[in-house]
Image: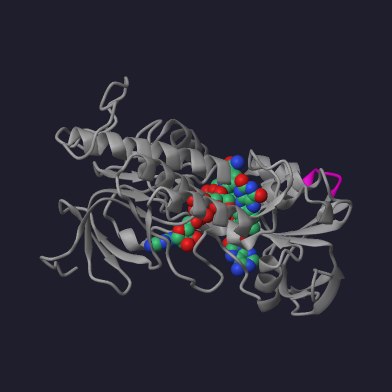
Amino acid sequence: MATTPDASTHELVIIGSGPAAWTAAIYAGRANLNPVLYEGEPVGIDLPGGQLMLTTDIENFPGFPEPISGPALMDRMKEQALRYGVRVESELIVEADLSQRPFLLKPNYGAPIRAHAVILATGAKAKWIGLENELRLAQIGGGVSACAVCDGALPHFRNKVLAVVGGGDTAMEEATYLTKFASEVLVIHRRDSFRASKAMASRVLNHPKIRVLWNTQVVDVLGDDVIEGVRLKDTVTGDERDLAVGGLFVAIGHEPNTGFLKGQLETTPHGYVVTTPGRTATSVPGVFAAGDVIDDYYRQAITSAGTGCMAALEAERYLAHHGIGESPVVETSETVVCAADAAPTIGLSGVQAAVGAAYGEPAVEPRG
Ligand code: FAD
Ligand code: NAP
């Protein structure tokens, strides 16, 4: 990335615009860190505001006894951050050089900027099959979703035949979860064997409410305002047929939004940012990460908001430790939060390590 000598330097840049980013912005704004937040741009169905822009009723975010729509919740988070003087730029950060101090970041259109501390809160995206009506119905809350834990309990899905697409652990988990609400769950998989672990696959195969449609692909989603069915194709014979369903859950994997970091810091084999155990500090001192970009396990708005808060507090303490701003707490906790001048103790967090082990991922060795 070309360096410009006049690149403006900020105390803290937050990248992202989901619950993690806005929570970090609220905390950093209140701490007078003058945060600048890059909220991204609309790219396909990905919108500034993050994954909740793709859903209707949120029933599990504390403080909202009545359901609140995903976009309304994100508007409120943004409004709250703006109240504390957060500067918002509606651009993607497309490149980062974290080996330089201050860090160098390249927005999509604007000149490169510099930051003494960075919070990565770029989230992850659920993968979709890519059918036009699938994406349209997902966006309007028409019975297509990529999150059973989030949407499965909504009245719309009760006592209906629900379809889950995928053959991995996520699909197994989603299908099993949906049996609480559905009259029947159909797992639609494109091959004749699951990719999922034996234990999770056998839970599905032995569940009286779940039926598996092997060698089957969804080639269209039917319905105008709400899903009425799916068009299926037999991957062996090529035959097509329509099947009535009351909901479709696409569970074919997630992808963390870390492509723009390109090896600048430690990530898991699946591209999630690795943080210090129990912290949001990454393998690069001064760079913190929060939300779904560090989490392939919980993937919830409230957990993202929680780690967003942690990242802002850690950034505040890091900056104060380096003479920028003030913090009542610099390094009083038992675990060193950041050790810019010492060798960082980086490894998988407790959760990530456990999850990584469960997934058969090797633990990341500490960097010396
Ligand atoms: P995200 O929400 O993933 O947002 C990050 C955003 O940052 C991106 O979308 C993009 O706009 C921006 N960004 C990405 N890269 C860049 C970049 N390079 N530069 C600038 N900006 C960038 N959770 C619940 O708790 N309750 C629910 O009811 C619920 N329903 C859901 C329904 C659906 C359909 C889906 C897909 C998810 C749902 N979730 C729900 C999960 C929840 O949406 C996520 O856990 C949460 O949004 C993750 O927040 P985040 O802050 O990590 O980032
Ligand atoms: P995954 O393992 O990559 O599986 C994705 C599944 O979706 C595969 O079966 C794949 O089919 C199918 N698929 C992909 N693209 C498709 C498309 N366009 N159309 C139809 N089907 C498609 O993803 P995951 O299930 O999300 O799991 C990701 C990681 O998280 C894994 O390591 C998994 O073990 C882990 N995980 C663990 C748990 C747990 O232990 N509790 C829970 C969830 C996830 P093919 O098989 O034909 O490729």
Vertical placement of 163 versus 198: above or below? below
Residue 13, how many percent across, how many down? 31, 53
- Mostly what secondary structure, the magenta segment? loop
Residue 181 in sight from this viewpoint:
yes
Give ligand 2's quarter of the image: bottom right
Residue drawn at x 18%, y 37% is 340
Residue drawn at x 45%, y 37% is 352
Residue 10, how many percent across, how many down? 23, 53
Vertical placement of 35 versus 349: above or below? below
Residue drawn at x 41%, y 53% is 271
In depth, the one of 273 and 49 nearer the eye is 49
Residue 252, how many percent across, how many down? 61, 60
Residue 135, how many percent across, how many down? 65, 71
Which segment did they paint magenta? 205-209
Residue drawn at x 50%, y 44% is 304
In depth, the one of 60 and 283 nearer the eye is 60
Please tell me in which quadrant of the rendered image residue 54 appears.
bottom right
Compared across the picture, whether 246 is left or right of 57 comes to right
- Residue that protrudes farthest toward the left in the picture: 5
Compared across the picture, whether 1 is left or right of 34 comes to left
Taking the magenta stretch, the answer to whether it contains residue 321 is no
**In which quadrant is the N terminus drawn?**
bottom left
